[in-house]
Amino acid sequence: MTFSLADILTARRVLRGQADATPFVPSPYMSARAGHDFLLKLETCQPIGAFKLRGAMNAVMTLPDGVSGVTCCSTGNHGRGVAYAAARRGIRAVICMSELVPQAKVDGIRALGAEVKIVGRSQDDALAESLRLVEAEGLAEISPFDDPKVIAGQGTIGFEMIEARPDLHTVLVPLSGGGLAGGVSVAVKSVNPDVQVIGITMDRGAAMQASIAAGHPVEVEEVPSLADSLGGGIGLKNKLSFPLCRDNLDAIVLVTEEEIRDAMQVLFYEDRMIAEGASVVGLAAVLAGKVRPEGPVGTIVTGRNLDMGQFHRIMAGEDIALGDRILKGKTYGA
Ligand SMILES: *Cc1c(COP(=O)(O)O)cnc(C)c1O
């Protein structure tokens, strides 16, 4: 399968006026910490509160005439994007998710009129159900990350970033299945091959990192994380996002739950912004000294669809239960 900047520029036309042109703004606090301009691409400003609208919209809007409906597996945000795009197109959407998906995300998808199926404890279980629906009900499956239309949609983010700041030196991309990192890396490196693109993910269940190390897609255990949107494998039959990430990412950096918590607090207390754990891993990597940028750096604040009760407790410095593990609370600035 070939994939290039041309796919991303085509997606840009599909998305124009519907899922594009999010703000790309400097964070004074993070710039001081990084020693260079540090810019935030605010995908939290998308109508579904996450960047996944781009890929989902590009995939749904370019399906052939007469399609009866769509289905997908999701950790929450892709499902929300597919539900939104399907409603726009006036077709049915069935979103399959595991029990690990937070209720706030499930509610958001139902509110868009989609059918929701909760199956099993992993993305693999949810994917199996989605593929069953393709056979049983003739729905079109839209992969959350391993689909050229989806990757092209996500890639438009990278194009907007490098267009706004041609001097970007480093781009820090939250990484799970690699649709975002795959698309963004093609976009920015097509414009300037010297830009460093670094994938960031949580240290437990880092599927893409394990797969690249093994030389082929491997399964990892899925565990509860503040970065719930980064959970799940990359698919043992991965065709496109795995090779794109393997060939284009300059590094993959892992962050801990404590580092994610600290970065959520920084974004809130310093920049007054609310974002999911998955969205702040780029900040977390710099704050923890795991990435030391050498020039202007941009990261993608990927989404804001979190559980507000949990967010409150994190900001108040209270302990957080992550499955059977307790993340000790920490008061900001203390
Ligand atoms: C899906 C998602 C990611 C990761 O995107 P991939 O294409 O799966 O790598 C990051 N942040 C948020 C909020 C997401 O929903």
Image (cartoon, rainbow, N blue to C red):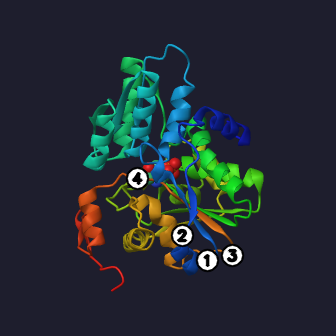
Q: Amino acid at mark 4?
A: Ser
Where residue 113 appears, as percent x and y from the top left, is 32, 29
Where residue 333 appears, as percent x and y from the top left, is 36, 83
Q: Which residue lies at the image location 35% right of the left edge and 39% below the top edge?
A: 126
Report the residue marked by disc 4: 229
Q: Which residue lies at the image location 41% right of the left edge and 27% below the top edge?
A: 87
The secondary element bearing badge 2 is classed as loop
Residue 292 — which label? 1
The disc, 3 or 4, on the residue closer to the chain's N-terminal end is 4
Q: Amino acid at mark 3?
A: Glu
Which mark's residue is nearer the viewer, 4 or 2? 2
Q: CA distance from mark 4 to mark 2?
A: 23 Å
The answer to the question of whether label 1 and label 4 lie on touching residues, with beta carbons closer than 8 A, is no
Label 1 crowd (10 A; few <14 / some 14-19 / many >=20): some
Q: Quadrant of residue 298?
A: bottom right
Label 4 crowd (10 A; few <14 / some 14-19 / many >=20): many
Report the residue marked by disc 2: 27
For residue 174, above or below residue 84: below
Whether residue 219 is visible to the viewer of this picture, yes or no, is no
The disc, 2 or 3, on the residue closer to the chain's N-terminal end is 2
The answer to the question of whether label 3 and label 1 lie on touching residues, with beta carbons closer than 8 A, is yes
Image mark count = 4
Residue 294 — which label? 3
The secondary element bearing badge 1 is classed as loop
Q: CA distance from mark 2 to mark 1?
A: 16 Å
The disc, 1 or 4, on the residue closer to the chain's N-terminal end is 4
Q: Which residue lies at the image location 55% right of the left edge and 42% below the top edge?
A: 238
